[in-house]
Image: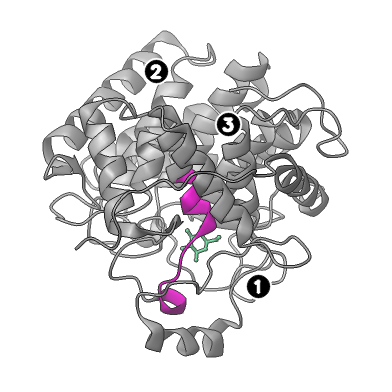
Amino acid sequence: MTLQAATPPSTPRVDFIEPARLGVQLIEHLQDADGAYPASPSFSAYAGYSWFRDGAFIADAMSAAGSTDSAERFFSWCAAVLEAREARIEAIIAAARAGAPVADHEMLGTRFTFAGEEGSDDWWDFQLDGYGTWLWAAGQHVRRHGGDPTPWRRAIELTVDYLIASWERPCFDWWEEHAEHVHVSTLGCIAAGLREAASIGVLDAERIELARSAEAAILERIHRDGVVDGHLSKWIGSREVDASLAAVVGLLDVVPATSELGLATIAAVRGELAVDDGVHRYLADTFYGGGQWPLLSCFLGIAESRAGNTAAAEALFSWAASTATESGDLPEQVRTHVLAPDRFDEWVERWGTVATPLLWSHAMLVRLAVELGVELGAGAGAGAGAGAGR
Ligand code: BGC
Protein backbone atom coordinates (compact mmCIF):
# COMPACT_ATOMS: atom_id res chain seq x y z
CA MET A 1 0.00 0.00 0.00
CA THR A 2 1.37 3.37 -0.96
CA LEU A 3 0.27 6.39 1.03
CA GLN A 4 2.01 9.02 -1.00
CA ALA A 5 4.48 9.24 -3.85
CA ALA A 6 7.92 10.66 -3.14
CA THR A 7 7.79 14.34 -4.04
CA PRO A 8 10.28 16.46 -2.14
CA PRO A 9 8.70 19.92 -2.12
CA SER A 10 10.71 22.92 -3.20
CA THR A 11 12.12 23.99 0.14
CA PRO A 12 11.21 27.37 1.59
CA ARG A 13 13.81 29.04 3.82
CA VAL A 14 14.10 26.86 6.87
CA ASP A 15 15.64 27.82 10.19
CA PHE A 16 17.83 24.82 10.95
CA ILE A 17 19.78 26.44 13.76
CA GLU A 18 17.27 27.69 16.31
CA PRO A 19 15.21 24.50 16.80
CA ALA A 20 18.43 22.50 17.06
CA ARG A 21 19.92 24.95 19.58
CA LEU A 22 16.77 24.77 21.66
CA GLY A 23 17.00 20.99 21.55
CA VAL A 24 20.57 20.94 22.84
CA GLN A 25 19.65 23.34 25.64
CA LEU A 26 16.57 21.35 26.64
CA ILE A 27 18.51 18.08 26.72
CA GLU A 28 21.33 19.60 28.78
CA HIS A 29 18.81 21.11 31.15
CA LEU A 30 16.90 17.86 31.67
CA GLN A 31 19.86 15.46 31.88
CA ASP A 32 20.07 13.93 35.33
CA ALA A 33 23.08 14.78 37.50
CA ASP A 34 24.29 11.16 37.20
CA GLY A 35 24.12 11.25 33.39
CA ALA A 36 20.78 9.63 32.55
CA TYR A 37 18.60 11.29 29.93
CA PRO A 38 14.91 11.19 30.87
CA ALA A 39 12.84 9.91 27.94
CA SER A 40 10.16 12.50 28.69
CA PRO A 41 10.14 14.35 32.02
CA SER A 42 6.45 14.31 32.87
CA PHE A 43 4.75 11.71 30.67
CA SER A 44 3.08 9.18 32.98
CA ALA A 45 4.52 5.98 31.51
CA TYR A 46 8.07 7.26 30.93
CA ALA A 47 8.74 9.66 33.82
CA GLY A 48 11.69 8.67 35.97
CA TYR A 49 13.21 6.30 33.40
CA SER A 50 16.10 6.49 30.96
CA TRP A 51 16.29 4.15 27.97
CA PHE A 52 19.48 2.75 26.47
CA ARG A 53 17.98 3.24 22.98
CA ASP A 54 16.65 6.79 23.36
CA GLY A 55 19.65 7.77 25.45
CA ALA A 56 22.22 6.47 22.99
CA PHE A 57 20.67 8.39 20.12
CA ILE A 58 20.42 11.47 22.33
CA ALA A 59 24.08 11.12 23.36
CA ASP A 60 25.11 10.75 19.73
CA ALA A 61 23.26 13.96 18.85
CA MET A 62 24.84 15.81 21.76
CA SER A 63 28.27 14.53 20.78
CA ALA A 64 27.73 15.57 17.16
CA ALA A 65 26.56 19.00 18.34
CA GLY A 66 29.71 19.47 20.40
CA SER A 67 28.20 18.82 23.86
CA THR A 68 30.85 16.25 24.61
CA ASP A 69 30.51 16.40 28.37
CA SER A 70 26.80 15.60 28.21
CA ALA A 71 27.39 12.61 25.93
CA GLU A 72 30.21 11.27 28.10
CA ARG A 73 28.13 11.55 31.25
CA PHE A 74 25.47 9.40 29.60
CA PHE A 75 28.02 6.79 28.51
CA SER A 76 29.37 6.70 32.06
CA TRP A 77 25.83 6.17 33.35
CA CYS A 78 25.41 3.23 30.93
CA ALA A 79 28.75 1.83 32.06
CA ALA A 80 27.70 2.04 35.72
CA VAL A 81 24.39 0.27 34.97
CA LEU A 82 26.28 -2.53 33.24
CA GLU A 83 29.10 -2.91 35.74
CA ALA A 84 26.59 -3.13 38.58
CA ARG A 85 25.20 -6.21 36.79
CA GLU A 86 28.52 -7.83 35.94
CA ALA A 87 27.85 -11.13 37.70
CA ARG A 88 24.36 -11.38 36.22
CA ILE A 89 25.60 -10.62 32.71
CA GLU A 90 28.36 -13.21 33.05
CA ALA A 91 25.76 -15.78 34.15
CA ILE A 92 23.55 -14.94 31.14
CA ILE A 93 26.53 -15.37 28.81
CA ALA A 94 27.64 -18.62 30.46
CA ALA A 95 24.12 -20.06 30.18
CA ALA A 96 23.93 -19.15 26.49
CA ARG A 97 27.36 -20.68 25.81
CA ALA A 98 26.30 -23.85 27.63
CA GLY A 99 23.31 -24.13 25.30
CA ALA A 100 20.76 -23.36 28.05
CA PRO A 101 19.93 -19.66 27.58
CA VAL A 102 18.07 -17.89 30.38
CA ALA A 103 14.41 -16.91 29.97
CA ASP A 104 13.50 -13.57 28.40
CA HIS A 105 12.51 -12.04 31.73
CA GLU A 106 16.01 -12.74 33.08
CA MET A 107 17.68 -10.79 30.29
CA LEU A 108 18.73 -7.14 30.75
CA GLY A 109 16.01 -4.47 30.72
CA THR A 110 15.56 -1.78 28.13
CA ARG A 111 15.20 1.11 30.59
CA PHE A 112 16.39 1.96 34.10
CA THR A 113 15.66 4.58 36.72
CA PHE A 114 18.09 7.50 36.83
CA ALA A 115 19.73 5.76 39.80
CA GLY A 116 20.34 2.76 37.56
CA GLU A 117 17.71 0.47 39.07
CA GLU A 118 15.11 -1.65 37.27
CA GLY A 119 12.24 0.29 38.85
CA SER A 120 8.94 -1.19 39.89
CA ASP A 121 6.72 -0.51 36.85
CA ASP A 122 6.05 -3.27 34.36
CA TRP A 123 7.52 -2.80 30.92
CA TRP A 124 8.14 -4.82 27.76
CA ASP A 125 11.68 -5.03 28.91
CA PHE A 126 13.61 -7.54 26.87
CA GLN A 127 15.01 -5.52 23.98
CA LEU A 128 18.52 -6.00 22.65
CA ASP A 129 18.84 -2.98 20.35
CA GLY A 130 19.80 -0.43 23.01
CA TYR A 131 22.85 -2.45 24.00
CA GLY A 132 24.10 -2.23 20.44
CA THR A 133 23.13 1.40 20.17
CA TRP A 134 25.04 2.56 23.25
CA LEU A 135 28.20 0.82 21.94
CA TRP A 136 27.65 2.46 18.56
CA ALA A 137 27.13 5.94 20.05
CA ALA A 138 30.13 5.65 22.37
CA GLY A 139 32.29 4.44 19.49
CA GLN A 140 31.14 7.25 17.22
CA HIS A 141 31.87 9.73 19.99
CA VAL A 142 35.39 8.42 20.52
CA ARG A 143 36.09 8.49 16.79
CA ARG A 144 34.59 11.96 16.38
CA HIS A 145 36.32 13.65 19.31
CA GLY A 146 39.29 11.37 19.93
CA GLY A 147 38.22 10.67 23.53
CA ASP A 148 39.47 7.93 25.80
CA PRO A 149 37.11 4.94 26.10
CA THR A 150 39.18 3.24 28.82
CA PRO A 151 36.81 4.16 31.69
CA TRP A 152 34.06 2.26 29.86
CA ARG A 153 36.19 -0.76 28.95
CA ARG A 154 34.62 -3.31 31.30
CA ALA A 155 31.09 -2.20 30.36
CA ILE A 156 31.97 -2.41 26.67
CA GLU A 157 33.42 -5.91 27.13
CA LEU A 158 30.32 -7.07 29.00
CA THR A 159 28.03 -5.62 26.34
CA VAL A 160 29.99 -7.18 23.48
CA ASP A 161 29.92 -10.60 25.15
CA TYR A 162 26.21 -10.23 25.97
CA LEU A 163 25.35 -9.34 22.38
CA ILE A 164 27.52 -12.05 20.83
CA ALA A 165 25.74 -14.58 23.05
CA SER A 166 22.24 -13.20 22.43
CA TRP A 167 21.85 -11.56 19.02
CA GLU A 168 20.00 -14.47 17.43
CA ARG A 169 17.22 -14.39 20.06
CA PRO A 170 13.81 -12.94 19.24
CA CYS A 171 12.97 -9.94 21.46
CA PHE A 172 10.67 -6.91 21.58
CA ASP A 173 11.38 -4.34 18.87
CA TRP A 174 11.91 -0.57 19.20
CA TRP A 175 8.15 -0.26 19.85
CA GLU A 176 7.88 -2.92 22.57
CA GLU A 177 6.11 -5.24 20.18
CA HIS A 178 6.37 -8.75 18.71
CA ALA A 179 8.75 -10.42 21.14
CA GLU A 180 8.37 -13.59 19.04
CA HIS A 181 10.31 -12.13 16.10
CA VAL A 182 13.89 -11.20 15.21
CA HIS A 183 13.67 -7.56 14.11
CA VAL A 184 15.88 -6.25 11.36
CA SER A 185 16.40 -2.87 13.01
CA THR A 186 17.43 -4.64 16.23
CA LEU A 187 19.97 -6.67 14.25
CA GLY A 188 21.18 -3.44 12.66
CA CYS A 189 21.70 -1.76 16.03
CA ILE A 190 23.67 -4.76 17.29
CA ALA A 191 25.83 -4.95 14.16
CA ALA A 192 26.60 -1.23 14.39
CA GLY A 193 27.50 -1.56 18.07
CA LEU A 194 29.83 -4.51 17.55
CA ARG A 195 31.47 -2.74 14.61
CA GLU A 196 32.20 0.36 16.69
CA ALA A 197 33.32 -1.55 19.78
CA ALA A 198 35.85 -3.45 17.69
CA SER A 199 37.32 -0.33 16.17
CA ILE A 200 38.10 2.06 19.03
CA GLY A 201 41.10 0.27 20.49
CA VAL A 202 39.49 -0.70 23.79
CA LEU A 203 39.12 -4.47 23.36
CA ASP A 204 41.72 -7.24 23.33
CA ALA A 205 42.52 -8.98 20.05
CA GLU A 206 40.44 -12.05 20.84
CA ARG A 207 37.30 -10.04 21.59
CA ILE A 208 37.83 -7.89 18.52
CA GLU A 209 37.94 -11.05 16.43
CA LEU A 210 34.76 -12.40 18.07
CA ALA A 211 32.97 -9.07 17.68
CA ARG A 212 33.94 -8.85 14.02
CA SER A 213 32.79 -12.36 13.21
CA ALA A 214 29.48 -11.80 15.04
CA GLU A 215 29.00 -8.57 13.11
CA ALA A 216 29.69 -10.42 9.85
CA ALA A 217 27.19 -13.15 10.79
CA ILE A 218 24.54 -10.54 11.60
CA LEU A 219 25.10 -8.77 8.28
CA GLU A 220 24.82 -12.10 6.49
CA ARG A 221 21.54 -12.81 8.32
CA ILE A 222 20.16 -9.38 7.42
CA HIS A 223 21.06 -9.73 3.75
CA ARG A 224 19.91 -13.34 3.52
CA ASP A 225 16.68 -13.28 5.56
CA GLY A 226 15.86 -9.63 6.25
CA VAL A 227 15.14 -8.45 2.72
CA VAL A 228 11.78 -8.53 0.93
CA ASP A 229 10.99 -7.06 -2.48
CA GLY A 230 14.50 -5.62 -2.59
CA HIS A 231 14.25 -3.60 0.68
CA LEU A 232 14.86 -4.37 4.35
CA SER A 233 11.89 -5.93 6.13
CA LYS A 234 10.37 -5.21 9.53
CA TRP A 235 11.35 -8.59 10.95
CA ILE A 236 12.79 -11.79 9.57
CA GLY A 237 9.94 -13.25 7.54
CA SER A 238 7.81 -10.09 7.41
CA ARG A 239 6.69 -8.54 4.13
CA GLU A 240 6.22 -5.15 5.81
CA VAL A 241 8.48 -2.19 6.33
CA ASP A 242 9.13 -0.27 9.55
CA ALA A 243 10.44 3.28 9.82
CA SER A 244 13.15 2.16 12.27
CA LEU A 245 14.86 0.66 9.21
CA ALA A 246 15.77 4.18 8.11
CA ALA A 247 18.27 4.17 11.00
CA VAL A 248 19.91 0.98 9.75
CA VAL A 249 20.42 2.59 6.36
CA GLY A 250 21.21 6.14 7.46
CA LEU A 251 22.65 6.96 10.84
CA LEU A 252 23.91 3.51 11.80
CA ASP A 253 25.31 2.95 8.31
CA VAL A 254 24.87 -0.81 8.49
CA VAL A 255 23.43 -0.85 4.97
CA PRO A 256 24.99 2.05 3.04
CA ALA A 257 22.38 4.63 1.99
CA THR A 258 23.76 4.69 -1.55
CA SER A 259 23.63 0.91 -2.02
CA GLU A 260 20.81 -0.68 -3.98
CA LEU A 261 19.35 -2.11 -0.78
CA GLY A 262 19.77 1.22 1.02
CA LEU A 263 18.06 3.21 -1.71
CA ALA A 264 15.23 0.68 -1.97
CA THR A 265 14.71 0.78 1.80
CA ILE A 266 14.59 4.57 1.81
CA ALA A 267 12.08 4.44 -1.04
CA ALA A 268 9.96 1.84 0.75
CA VAL A 269 9.89 3.76 4.06
CA ARG A 270 9.03 6.95 2.21
CA GLY A 271 6.51 5.38 -0.11
CA GLU A 272 4.73 3.29 2.55
CA LEU A 273 5.04 5.38 5.67
CA ALA A 274 5.55 9.08 4.86
CA VAL A 275 2.68 11.50 4.32
CA ASP A 276 3.70 15.10 3.69
CA ASP A 277 7.10 14.31 5.28
CA GLY A 278 5.54 13.05 8.51
CA VAL A 279 6.59 9.45 9.05
CA HIS A 280 4.54 6.66 10.63
CA ARG A 281 6.16 3.80 12.54
CA TYR A 282 4.45 1.07 10.46
CA LEU A 283 1.15 0.70 8.69
CA ALA A 284 -0.68 -1.32 11.34
CA ASP A 285 0.24 1.10 14.15
CA THR A 286 -2.56 1.96 16.58
CA PHE A 287 -0.57 3.61 19.44
CA TYR A 288 -2.32 6.97 19.98
CA GLY A 289 -4.09 6.23 16.71
CA GLY A 290 -0.83 5.68 14.83
CA GLY A 291 0.22 9.27 14.16
CA GLN A 292 3.40 10.68 12.63
CA TRP A 293 6.68 10.78 14.52
CA PRO A 294 9.07 13.72 14.12
CA LEU A 295 12.02 11.59 15.21
CA LEU A 296 11.28 9.16 12.38
CA SER A 297 11.15 11.98 9.84
CA CYS A 298 14.63 12.91 11.09
CA PHE A 299 15.93 9.34 10.77
CA LEU A 300 14.60 9.25 7.23
CA GLY A 301 16.11 12.70 6.62
CA ILE A 302 19.57 11.47 7.66
CA ALA A 303 19.20 8.50 5.32
CA GLU A 304 18.06 10.78 2.47
CA SER A 305 20.94 13.12 3.13
CA ARG A 306 23.45 10.26 3.02
CA ALA A 307 21.86 9.10 -0.23
CA GLY A 308 22.57 12.56 -1.63
CA ASN A 309 18.99 13.86 -1.46
CA THR A 310 19.60 17.06 0.48
CA ALA A 311 16.37 18.78 -0.53
CA ALA A 312 14.35 15.78 0.68
CA ALA A 313 16.29 15.76 3.96
CA GLU A 314 15.65 19.48 4.47
CA ALA A 315 11.94 19.04 3.85
CA LEU A 316 11.83 16.24 6.45
CA PHE A 317 13.66 18.50 8.93
CA SER A 318 11.19 21.26 8.22
CA TRP A 319 8.21 19.00 8.89
CA ALA A 320 9.74 17.65 12.12
CA ALA A 321 10.49 21.18 13.35
CA SER A 322 6.92 22.23 12.52
CA THR A 323 5.54 19.78 15.10
CA ALA A 324 6.91 21.86 17.99
CA THR A 325 4.45 23.32 20.47
CA GLU A 326 4.32 27.08 21.05
CA SER A 327 6.95 26.73 23.75
CA GLY A 328 9.24 24.81 21.38
CA ASP A 329 8.69 21.30 22.75
CA LEU A 330 8.70 18.39 20.32
CA PRO A 331 6.19 15.59 20.92
CA GLU A 332 6.63 11.88 20.40
CA GLN A 333 3.99 11.94 17.66
CA VAL A 334 1.37 14.22 16.14
CA ARG A 335 -2.17 13.65 14.89
CA THR A 336 -1.72 15.42 11.57
CA HIS A 337 -2.39 12.11 9.83
CA VAL A 338 -3.51 9.06 11.77
CA LEU A 339 -3.79 5.47 10.64
CA ALA A 340 -6.34 4.32 13.24
CA PRO A 341 -8.30 7.39 14.42
CA ASP A 342 -10.62 5.37 16.66
CA ARG A 343 -7.66 4.11 18.70
CA PHE A 344 -6.52 7.53 19.94
CA ASP A 345 -8.76 8.03 22.96
CA GLU A 346 -7.96 4.73 24.63
CA TRP A 347 -4.30 5.77 24.95
CA VAL A 348 -5.17 9.21 26.30
CA GLU A 349 -7.33 7.48 28.91
CA ARG A 350 -4.55 5.05 29.74
CA TRP A 351 -1.45 7.29 29.76
CA GLY A 352 -2.61 10.90 29.22
CA THR A 353 -1.77 13.15 26.28
CA VAL A 354 1.13 12.29 23.96
CA ALA A 355 4.63 12.47 25.56
CA THR A 356 5.87 16.07 25.17
CA PRO A 357 8.67 16.97 25.18
CA LEU A 358 10.25 13.74 24.08
CA LEU A 359 14.02 14.15 24.32
CA TRP A 360 14.63 11.61 21.56
CA SER A 361 12.57 13.81 19.16
CA HIS A 362 14.69 16.84 20.00
CA ALA A 363 17.87 14.81 19.66
CA MET A 364 17.01 13.57 16.19
CA LEU A 365 16.28 17.11 15.02
CA VAL A 366 19.69 18.13 16.36
CA ARG A 367 21.34 15.17 14.67
CA LEU A 368 19.69 15.88 11.31
CA ALA A 369 20.73 19.54 11.57
CA VAL A 370 24.34 18.47 12.07
CA GLU A 371 24.01 16.06 9.18
CA LEU A 372 22.88 18.96 7.04
CA GLY A 373 26.02 20.85 7.97
CA VAL A 374 24.67 23.14 10.68
CA GLU A 375 27.36 24.26 13.15
CA LEU A 376 25.98 24.20 16.68
CA GLY A 377 29.17 24.50 18.69
CA ALA A 378 29.21 28.09 19.86
CA GLY A 379 26.43 28.76 22.33
CA ALA A 380 24.41 25.66 21.43
CA GLY A 381 23.94 24.87 25.08
CA ALA A 382 25.65 25.81 28.32
CA GLY A 383 28.33 23.13 27.98
CA ALA A 384 28.74 23.20 24.20
CA GLY A 385 32.32 23.24 23.02
CA ALA A 386 33.70 22.21 19.65
CA GLY A 387 31.94 22.75 16.34
CA ALA A 388 29.59 20.23 14.80
CA GLY A 389 30.84 17.36 12.73
CA ARG A 390 30.18 13.72 11.96
C1 BGC B 1 8.55 3.76 22.32
C2 BGC B 1 10.00 3.40 22.51
C3 BGC B 1 10.71 4.47 23.32
C4 BGC B 1 9.95 4.80 24.58
C5 BGC B 1 10.55 5.99 25.31
C6 BGC B 1 7.92 4.05 23.66
O1 BGC B 1 6.59 4.38 23.49
O2 BGC B 1 7.87 2.69 21.70
O3 BGC B 1 10.66 3.27 21.28
O4 BGC B 1 11.99 4.02 23.62
O5 BGC B 1 8.63 5.11 24.27
O6 BGC B 1 10.65 7.11 24.50
Instruction: Return the residue at label 1.
Output: 43
Quadrant of image for the C terminus: top right
Instruction: Tell me: residue 6, above or below residue 345.
Output: above
Is residue 232 or residue 88 the one in the foreground? 232
Q: Earlier in the sequence, mark 1 or mark 2?
A: 1
Instruction: Tell me: residue 300, above or below residue 75.
Output: below
| Display colour scheme | one colour
**Cα gap from disc 1 to disc 2, whole angstroms:** 40 Å
Whether the residue carrying mark 2 lies under 8 Å from ligand 1 is answered with no
CB within 8 Å, label 1 to label 2: no
Of helix, strand and loop, which one carries label 2?
A: helix
User: Is 9 contained in the magenta span?
Assistant: no
Instruction: Return the residue at label 2.
Output: 207
Q: Which of marks 2 and 3 is nearer the N terminus?
A: 2
Instruction: Say left or right for 45 vs 343.
Output: right
Q: What residue type is labelled 3?
A: Leu
Q: What stretch is highlighted in magenta?
A: 287-299
- Checking the image for residue 372, the label placed there is 3
Q: Earlier in the sequence, mark 3 or mark 1?
A: 1
Viewer-nearest of labels 2 and 3? 3
User: Is 295 contained in the magenta span?
Assistant: yes
- Checking the image for residue 228, the label placed there is none
Instruction: Say left or right for 268 vs 389.
Output: left
- Counting from the top left corner in percent of width and height, residue 302 is at 47, 37
Q: Which amino acid does label 1 sit on?
A: Phe
- Residue 325 visible, this angle: yes
Q: Which amino acid does label 2 sit on?
A: Arg
- Counting from the top left corner in percent of width and height, residue 63 is at 67, 31
Residue at the spot x=18%, y=29% of the render? 220
